[in-house]
Amino acid sequence: MSISLDEAVELTRTGDLWVFRGRSVPDRAIQLTTNSPVNHVGMAVVLDDMPPLMWHAELGRSLPDMWTGTHQRGVQLHDLRDAVCVWGNRYGQRGWLRQLEPPADTAMEEAVLRTVARLDGTPFPSTAQLAWRWARGRLPHPPRLSLSGLRGRTADTSRIGDTSRAADTSRAADTSRTADTSRIGETSRENAAALETAYCAEVVAVTYEAMGLLPAGRRPNWYDPGRFWSGDDLALNGGAHLGAEIEVRIPPR
């Protein structure tokens, strides 16, 4: 299936993904390393009367960042149509659109804006950093004490009086449920704060996690562009899913 860029921009909603494939040596290296046909991923941000925007990370600074109004490298918010044209014409990439179903709701859009405020302007990693970070993301994640477990231990050590065991169990369960509902947001904030540099897939992953679409607990560098194409079985939360790639015809400039 193939559509024009104008049609794709008209269809795009917040949370939809744009994936790209190039032929340069760095592009092919990323594709071979991640065993996928794509080497770049960005996320659409479409809010109210604003033009559709592209939220991604790249080395170039050819377009003004719509959040700061400056030209910068690293994590950026661009006019979506202009960004796709740059990737198609300047970088020689083919582009595809993957739509998020169901569409993002208001709470998700607010989470996107909070993530943009935290991450915009974060530098892009060097080639060596990128390779090392990606490799570390494949290593097993060391187990950590969960927030609910920590609170449970605090509650155990601070029990006072003759409260019954049943009441203690009930309170611990309530605390655990509260921790479970807040864990996704807390983990996404920690991940965003920990990123001193960020590549494209990490930006999308942290944003999706803040939106509640990806499970908490994974390091951002577990993700690479190949995780976001249809050949990878990326499970989203809450019954959400990504549609198949729709090829976008990028006009020459």
Image (cartoon, grey):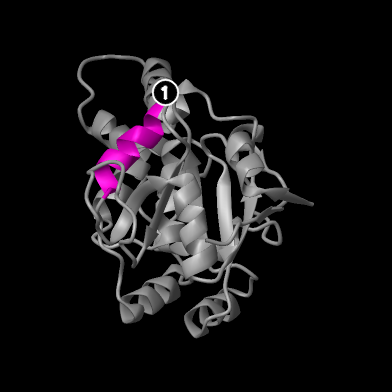
> Which residue is outermost to the front?
253
Q: Position of residue 8 (x, y in %)?
A: 63, 43
The magenta segment is 110-120
Mark 1: give few (<14), some (14-19) or many (20+) Cα within 10 Å: few
Q: Residue at x 56, y 34 (%)?
A: 13
* Residue carrying label 1: 169
- Relative vertical location of residue 211 with respect to residue 63 in this rendering, above or below: above
Q: Residue at x 47, y 81 (%)?
A: 26
Quadrant position of residue 49:
top left
Confirm whether residue 230 shows in the render.
Answer: yes
* Residue 119 colored in magenta in the image: yes
Q: Position of residue 125 (x, y in %)?
A: 30, 70
Nearer to me, 45 or 151: 45
Q: Position of residue 126 (x, y in %)?
A: 30, 76
Q: Position of residue 90 (x, y in %)?
A: 47, 68
Predominant SS along the magenta part: helix
- Relative vertical location of residue 126 with respect to residue 86 in this rendering, above or below: below
Nearer to me, 171 or 136: 136
Quadrant position of residue 200:
bottom left
Nearer to me, 214 or 36: 36
Q: Residue at x 48, y 33 (%)?
A: 46
Q: Amino acid at mark 1?
A: Thr
Confirm whether residue 223 shows in the render.
Answer: no
* Residue 21 colored in magenta in the image: no
Quadrant position of residue 134:
bottom left
Q: Residue at x 53, y 39 (%)?
A: 15
